[in-house]
Image (cartoon, rainbow, N blue to C red):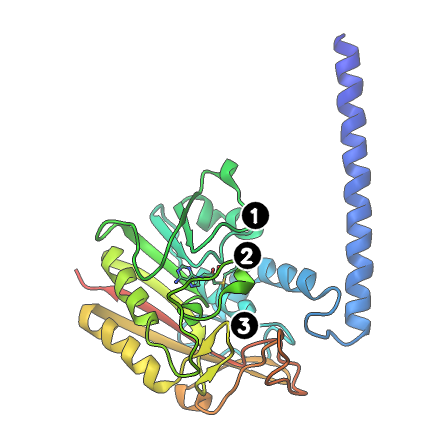
Amino acid sequence: MQLFRVVLFQYRKYKKAIKNKRIQNLQQSTLKKYFQKGQIPWSDGYQLYKEKSIVESINSTDILQRFNHDETLESFGYRLDERIVEYPWIFKNLQNKSAKLLDAGSTFNYEFILDHPLIKEKELIIFTYAPESRSYNEKKISYVYGDLRELPFKDQYFEVIVSQSTIEHIDMNNSIYGYQNDDDRKSDLKSYKYLLAIKEMIRVLKPSGTLLLTFPFGKFENHDFFQQLDREMLQRLLNEFHLKGSYVTNFFRYLPSGWYSCDESDCNEIVSFNPHTNKGKGDDGAAHCRSICCIKFTKNL
Ligand SMILES: C[S@@+](CC[C@H](N)C(=O)[O-])C[C@H]1O[C@@H](n2cnc3c(N)ncnc32)[C@H](O)[C@@H]1O
């Protein structure tokens, strides 16, 4: 009986190794074709390369170093969308200690993020409007569903809040995320409802807690499923932060050779590419947004 178990164990191990090797070979050939064809955004191999690049960046001290406030980022993340800048910027700003962490918008709901040591040591709550196809309950994460404009948490509950490219979807058409909210408007004009979510995030943040916020920033645009915030919308948001704490802003823009640090004024006329409608497509290889704003807010004691 014992021998049978040992043989069965070895056989399963062998089968798993064969399967992993097959997946590895397939991935290598997909990536090879992706590079041969010129790294076209959203083509075969794009998601795989993007994920590999994000994993590499959030695990590399050298790359994270490039996201220090006084460093200048140049030619980074060629032909990749803004996540290649947002994740390392966020990880650079996450501290190495246990804390209650709110992911406001569910951009951490990926195995390659959840397994990172900086996340594993934290008590993570993933909050979004509706359940997604993946969930990792075995990893002891809490999933909470609801509206960011009315968070179901008590005041001063979280030490850290991360909200990555989410506020621009508030009050917009979220059917690509599998739901429709009757409250959401149908107008082409600016919506300021994101400010309600910002107020809520500040409310549930502990004194001296940190909120890491990112969003597309440039010329105001309505892309139906998201709006791009402009200077005036940013100013309103900063007014909220100004009342309750201090903040540091970073801006990044996409140029044909990749992502660069820049000033706020460099972004004012920049438009996004919407891969769902092709609006804003250019020959610069931009995969989605061409400029983003990242804000680190620290709440007053
Ligand atoms: C950037 S997407 C994240 C989705 C996906 N997991 C990802 O990583 O790209 C933003 C998320 O914000 C959610 N969202 C939009 N408006 C919301 C609202 N008012 N309250 C809560 N979540 C909202 C959408 O459902 C969507 O899941």
For disc 2, the neighbor class at 10 Å (few under 14, some 14 to 19, many from 20) is some
Q: Give the percent coordinates (x, y) of residue 164.
A: 44, 64
Reading the image, the residue beneath label 2 is 59
Q: Amino acid at mark 1?
A: Arg
Q: Position of residue 41 (x, y in %)?
A: 68, 73
The Cα–Cα distance between marks 2 and 3, rounded to whole angstroms, is 18 Å
Check the image and report above or below for 128 versus 88: above
Disc 1, disc 2: CB below 8 Å?
Answer: no
Q: Secondary structure at mark 3?
A: loop
Disc 3 marks a residue whose amino acid type is Glu
Front residue of 115 and 284 = 284
- Contact? badges 2 and 3 (CB < 8 Å): no
Provide the secondary structure element on which disc 1 rests: loop
In-front residue for pair 170/120: 170
Q: Residue at horizontal 30%, vertical 55%?
A: 151
The residue singled out by tag 3 in the image is 82
Residue at (44, 66) in percent of width and height: 166
Q: Height in image: 271 above or below 183?
A: below
**Badge 2 element:** loop
Q: Mark 2 or mark 3, which has the lower sequence index?
A: 2
Residue behind mark 1: 134
Q: Position of residue 14 (x, y in %)?
A: 80, 32
